[in-house]
Image (spheres, rainbow, N blue to C red):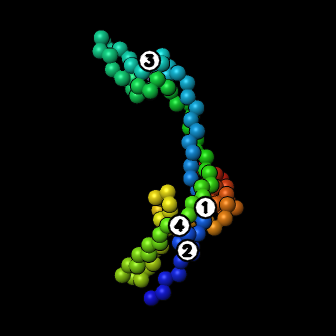
Amino acid sequence: MKIETKFEIGQIVYYVGFKYIKQTCECRACEGKGKVTLNMFTVGCPVCQGSKLEILSSKRDGIVKKDIIKAIQADVDSDNEISVEYDLTDNSCFNEIHLYASVEEAEQEIKIMESEE
Ligand SMILES: [Zn+2]
């Protein structure tokens, strides 16, 4: 059996990562104290979970990340279906459909994801 891989060990690849942008304000339920008093009992604020901040909105932005392939693992099941996974130097692991050879291809994927949201 011959297994073809899309990328090679040591090759630079790009993938889509996310950064989360949150807009917050002082929690209105506990007035920024992180605790509320109910019938003489003081409990952690159920709205902000004690963080004192209330989340007004949150959105995620796709960003292109760059890494190098450290190892390749191929799994072959009983139907001879091959699945190839790549280990990167940051210890993440991706199927080859989620890795790109250029920044442009990864940016294109972000555009597709954003248009689907
Ligand atoms: Zn609160």
> Does residue 94 appear anywhere in the picture?
no
Find residue 49 and report its horizontal and vertical position in percent. Answer: 40, 28
- Out of 60 and 73, give the one closest to the viewer: 73
The residue identified by callout 1 is 14
Crowding near pointer 4: few (<14 within 10 Å), some, many (20+)? many
Which residue is drawn at the image coordinates 48% and 16% (left, top)? 31
Find residue 4 and report its horizontal and vertical position in percent. Answer: 53, 81
- Numbered circle sitting on residue 33: 3
**Circle 1 or circle 2, nearest the eye:** 2
Q: Are marks 2 and 4 in contact (CB under 8 Å)?
A: yes
SS of the residue at dot 1?
Answer: strand
Which image quadrant: the N terminus?
Answer: bottom left
Q: Mark 1 belongs to which amino acid?
A: Tyr
Crowding near pointer 3: few (<14 within 10 Å), some, many (20+)? some
Residue farthest right in this picture: 104
Tell me the CA gap for discs 2 and 3: 54 Å
Q: Are marks 1 and 2 in contact (CB under 8 Å)?
A: no
Crowding near pointer 2: few (<14 within 10 Å), some, many (20+)? some
- Is the shortest distance between ligand 1 and the CB of mark 1 under 8 Å? no
